[in-house]
Image (spheres, grey):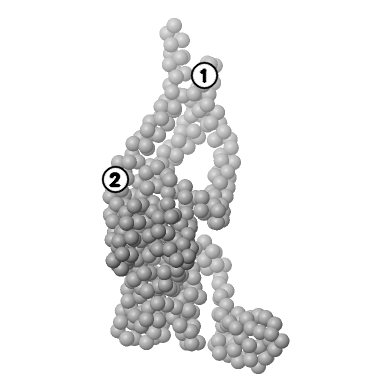
């Protein structure tokens, strides 16, 4: 027996809601009708989980990955193409799915189908698993009778997205490891090495130069107040994550990321590639233009660019062309604008957008392969400056004491 959340109107027309336990959604409707309540919506209530499961769900540890969605899409493509009944196919896929949340989502989709809803409506019940673009593409395929093509398109799109993210992570892995290693080395020097030299200089009762005094003061602060440093660091990370969850914070951070040296241009080109690829897929699938731009504005995963796409939607609602609204945003490069304009003139917008996405993906691949040559000089200069400061702070007083002994 499951719990259901219902909403309806009573005999007086008042809006009422509640929670009831039943073995099927039809039983809930029968109970409400017996009470002279006209049901408006009946949804299955989320099941209560254990403490460990609840914690993992809140932390997002068991959220389905792109690989899970790709496998689900390919399995559904194969089953729908073979003519397997949809409910039976979903049950088979859900039984073989390893991710718990995805399996529960599929089970909820099966319940929605058995209660008379459509597949897209069932997928929309779990927006944290199936994003709005996924639901819209499936809805178009369900309406047009080409459901297998919709799953195939989503599988191809998600595979490209997975490969792009993997390339970005691989390119950033080396500089992140170098930066982390440098900070660990500095922390070890400040906590263990510098105090030894500080005790030595204190016994000599010598006047220390300014770099040495700064290094010793920093070391003393790190040794005595290390807990405060960790607390401040954790608080700063928590505050930053809370800030970027806000609409204004997310918008400013996404805009700042695109303006970072070296990495900013790569992120910008990758965002344009994601925009062109998403727009081409929704256009090819037959999603209405306004709705497609709404989906694309969420799919680019950048609030700054997403706002520009939303401005395009507003311009198109006023009757302007896609190329003119894109140009009015001031965000897109001449290549994107020219490709969209040519696509509008020839009636092949989706093909031009696909070529644009492929062009930017090649540019991103090239920049990612050469990222090390861009970042290494910056890291070397930073490391050289750090070593110079530490060397001067440690060896300058030694030279002074040596000179005084010889004098």
| Pointers 1 and 2 in contact (C-beta within 8 Å) | no
Q: Give percent across and percent down for residue 42.
A: 58, 82
Quadrant of the rendered image containing residue 78: bottom left
Q: Give percent across and percent down for residue 240.
A: 54, 49
> Reading the chain from its start, which is encountered first: label 1 or label 2?
1
Question: Callout 1: helix, strand or loop?
Answer: loop
Task: Pick the quarter of the image with the N terminus.
Answer: bottom right
Q: Is residue 279 above or below residue 237?
A: below
Label drawn at residue 127: none
Quadrant of the rendered image containing residue 51: bottom right
Residue 170 appears anywhere in the view? no
Residue 58 appears anywhere in the view? yes
Task: Pick the quarter of the image with the C terminus.
Answer: top left
Q: Residue at x 45, y 10 (%)?
A: 405
Tag count: 2
Q: Give percent across and percent down for residue 113.
A: 46, 84
Question: Callout 2: helix, strand or loop?
Answer: loop
Q: Is residue 403 above or below residue 249?
A: above
Residue at mark 1 = 208
Label drawn at residue 370: 2
Q: Is residue 97 above or below residue 59?
A: below
Q: Give percent across and percent down for residue 173.
A: 36, 49
Residue 69 horizontal side relative to residue 205, left or right: left
Q: CA distance from mark 1 to mark 2?
A: 44 Å
The 10 Å Cα crowd at callout 1, few under 14, some 14 to 19, many 20 or more, is some
Q: Residue at x 29, y 52 (%)?
A: 363
């Amino acid at each position: 027996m499951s719990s259901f959340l219902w909403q309806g109107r009573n005999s007086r027309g008042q809006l009422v809601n509640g929670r009831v336990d039943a073995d099927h959604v039809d039983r809930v409707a029968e109970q409400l009708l017996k009470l002279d309540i006209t049901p408006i919506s009946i949804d299955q209530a989320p099941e209560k989980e254990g403490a460990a499961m609840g914690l993992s769900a809140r932390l997002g540890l068991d959220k389905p990955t792109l690989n899970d969605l790709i496998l689900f899409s390919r399995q559904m493509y194969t089953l729908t193409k073979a003519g397997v009944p949809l409910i039976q196919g979903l049950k088979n896929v859900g039984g073989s799915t390893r991710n718990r949340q995805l399996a529960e989502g599929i089970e909820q989709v099966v319940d929605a189908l058995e209660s008379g809803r459509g597949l897209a409506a069932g997928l929309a019940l779990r927006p944290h698993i199936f994003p709005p673009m996924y639901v819209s593409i499936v809805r178009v395929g369900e309406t047009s009778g080409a459901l297998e093509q919709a799953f195939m398109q989503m599988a191809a799109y998600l595979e490209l997205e997975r490969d792009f993210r993997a390339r970005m992570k691989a390119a950033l892995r080396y500089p992140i490891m170098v930066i982390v290693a440098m900070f660990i080395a500095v922390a070890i020097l400040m906590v263990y090495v510098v105090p030894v030299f500080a005790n030595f200089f204190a016994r000599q009762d010598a006047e220390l130069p300014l770099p040495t005094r700064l290094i010793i003061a920093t070391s003393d602060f790190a040794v005595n107040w290390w807990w405060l440093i960790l607390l401040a660091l954790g608080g700063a990370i928590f505050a930053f994550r809370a800030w970027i969850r806000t609409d204004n914070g997310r918008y400013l951070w996404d805009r700042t990321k695109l303006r970072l040296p070296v990495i900013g241009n790569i992120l910008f080109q990758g965002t344009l590639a994601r925009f062109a690829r998403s727009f081409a897929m929704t256009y090819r699938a037959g999603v209405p233009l306004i709705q497609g731009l709404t989906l694309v504005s969420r799919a680019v995963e950048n609030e700054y660019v997403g706002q520009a796409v939303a401005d395009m939607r507003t311009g198109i609602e006023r009757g302007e062309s896609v190329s003119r609204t894109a140009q009015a945003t001031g965000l897109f490069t001449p290549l994107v604008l020219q490709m969209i304009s040519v696509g509008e003139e020839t009636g092949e917008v989706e093909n031009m957008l696909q070529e644009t996405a492929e062009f930017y993906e090649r540019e991103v691949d090239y920049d990612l392969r050469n990222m090390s040559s861009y970042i290494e000089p910056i890291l070397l200069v930073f490391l050289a400056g750090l070593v110079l400061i530490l060397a001067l702070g440690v060896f300058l007083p030694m030279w002074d004491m040596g000179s005084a002994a010889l004098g």
